[in-house]
Amino acid sequence: PRGYWILVSKSTTRADSLGACLDLARDLMVRTLMEGPIADWNVQNPCNPVSSGDRIVAVNGVSSEAGAMYDELISSVGQVQISLVRPSFLSIEPSDIVHRYTIQTTRTGNWSWGCRLRATEFQRRYLMVQDLTPGIFALWNSQNPLMPVSIGDVIERINGREGSPSQLVEMLKKAEGP
């Protein structure tokens, strides 16, 4: 799993003050994102967004167990440092897939998609986002912080069409807006 940390600012101890619905039975897995400090982080850090499926592994240095981390998360006000891991797509079970979503964006001119991709095999062949850089996906993330494209996400279709990873890459290269 890929680990990273974020620094967010909380102003209250309310359970929903983080802007994320957490699955306490799944080691503080981020289930969904809402408006709040994490969405603000995603706007400011579109190449390293927090996504559904990420797991919190430490809060302000507390990493002993989920209950203690949750207590620290809720009771903290002000700056909160959260360490997360993003599971590898290859290591998750189909029941762990949080959701599928569709993004719609337009590529114009010489804009880069802003990602590095790699082919992977998981029940069938997919194209996985391996890295994010400034470009169209980062712009999408800054404008859609509750549903960001993240490292480890899988591209299944381009303009409604399926294909092998190499065919999907070619479709991305040819995709342009009106």
Image (cartoon, rainbow, N blue to C red):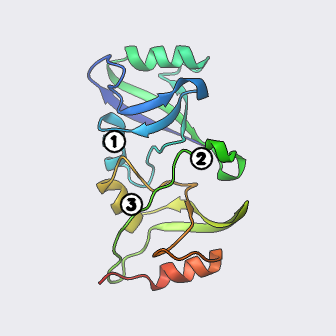
Judging from the image, what secondary structure is the residue with disc 3 in? helix
Q: Which residue is mark 1?
A: 39
Can residue 134 be seen here? The reply is: no
| Image location (x, y in percent) of residue 149 | 45, 56
The residue positioned 52% from the left and 21% from the top of the image is 61
Q: Which residue is nearer to you in this view: 162 or 26?
A: 162
State whether residue 172 is above or below residue 98: below
Q: Amino acid at mark 2?
A: Ile
Quadrant of the rendered image containing residue 12? top left
Which is more N-terminal, label 2 or label 1? Answer: 1
- Is disc 2 placed on a helix, strand or loop? loop
In the rendered image, the residue lying farthest to the left is: 11
Left/right placement of residue 121 relative to residue 56 reads right
**Count of numbered circles on the image:** 3
Q: Position of residue 154 (x, y in %)?
A: 57, 60
Percent of width and height locating residue 147: 40, 50
Tell me whether circle 2 and circle 3 mark residues in contact (CB < 8 Å): no
Of the numbered discs 2 and 3, the one sitting upstream in the chain is 2
Q: Residue at x 43, y 20 (%)?
A: 73
Which quadrant would the N terminus be assigned to in this image? top right
Which label sits on residue 97? Answer: 2
The residue at which mark 3 appears reads as 138
Give percent across and percent down for residue 112: 42, 74
The residues bearing labels 1 and 3 have C-alpha atoms spaced at a distance of: 14 Å
Residue type beneath disc 3: Ala
Give the residue type at disc 1: Ala
Q: Residue 94, relative to residue 156: is it above or below?
A: above
Nearest-to-viewer mark from 1 and 2: 2
Residue ID at (49%, 35%)? 30
